[in-house]
Image: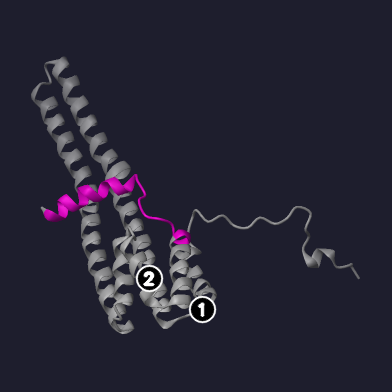
């Protein structure tokens, strides 16, 4: 029941995206990296207390407290794995519902046909039974393919995006602990933002031509 309850809570996330895109996270952690490089990790103690993201706050607090980098990676990696396992179990609730829904619709159709066979002499009851059979089938197949299975796929996509976001945070905090140059850290983290659908590609200036196109034809 705890898994089912978690799945129902996660269902709201199918329609509402609560987490910031990777680009926003990168900008935030680069700010922390710049401050830590200038003033040391201890200067981030007050900033860490104001962070709203619990995972980023925990990671930065571990860094400020002087926890070994390997230990930080181990602890945060374990938390990511366990959370993803729980989320996958909740996504499977909707997958199972998508598998059972058509079967339930077929059962409803059979019950409607039984009603038809019992009342062949009464045309009104025959029509009612046929309607029940069709409606049950439509509800079963429709709910599976329009609700349950798409919800499961969307939840899995959100799980993957959440994992990538937390992996980004782990890499960012690791770079801050190592004292990596913020510019180099940004280049390292930009790989996580490549798949961000909200990141628009750079538009070419109008009138620019390919170098090959400008070359004279021999």
Quarter of the image for the C terminus: give it: bottom right
Mark 1 crowd level (few <14, some 14–19, many ≥20, 10 Å Cα): some
Query: On the image, numbered disc 1 is attached to which residue?
Result: 181
Q: Which mark is residue 54?
A: none
Position above or below: 3 against 63: above
Under circle 1, the secondary element is loop
Horizontal side of residue 35 vs 11, given as left or right: right
Q: Position of residue 167 (x, y in %)?
A: 37, 70
In the image, residue 103 sits, relative to residue 171, either above or below, namely: above
Q: Which residue is mark 2?
A: 44
Q: Residue at x 10, y 52 (%)?
A: 1
Residue 99 appearing in the image:
no
86 shown above or below 110: below
What percent of the width, then of the height, locates residue 172? 41, 73
Between the C-alphas of marks 2 and 1, the distance is 16 Å
Q: Is residue 181 magenta?
A: no
The image position of residue 128, as x and y in percent, is 17, 21
Tell me what residue is drawn at x 24 percent, y 53 percent: 95
Of badges 2 and 1, nearer the viewer stands 2
Relative depth, front residue between 69 and 19: 69
Which stretch did the figure color magenta? 2-24
Q: Quadrant of residue 61?
A: bottom left
């Amino acid at each position: 029941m705890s898994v089912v309850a978690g799945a129902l809570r996660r269902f709201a996330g199918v329609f509402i995206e609560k987490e910031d895109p990777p680009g926003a996270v990168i900008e935030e952690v680069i700010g922390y990296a710049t401050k830590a490089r200038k003033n040391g990790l201890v200067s981030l103690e007050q900033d860490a207390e104001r962070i709203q993201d619990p995972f980023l706050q925990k990671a930065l607090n571990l860094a400020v407290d002087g926890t070994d980098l390997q230990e930080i990676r181990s602890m945060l990696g374990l938390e990511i794995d366990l959370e993803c396992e729980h989320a996958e179990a909740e996504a499977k609730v909707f997958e199972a519902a998508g598998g059972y829904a058509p079967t339930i619709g077929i059962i409803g159709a059979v019950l409607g046909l039984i009603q038809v066979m019992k009342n062949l002499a009464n045309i009104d009851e025959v029509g009612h039974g046929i309607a029940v059979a069709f409606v049950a089938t439509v509800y079963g197949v429709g709910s599976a393919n329009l609700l349950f299975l798409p919800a499961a796929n969307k939840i899995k996509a959100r799980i993957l995006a959440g994992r990538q976001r937390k992996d980004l945070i782990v890499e960012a905090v690791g770079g801050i602990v190592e004292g990596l140059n913020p510019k180099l850290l940004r280049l390292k983290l930009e790989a996580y933002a490549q798949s961000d659908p909200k990141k628009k590609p750079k538009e070419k200036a109008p009138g620019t031509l390919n170098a090959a196109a400008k070359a004279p034809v021999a």
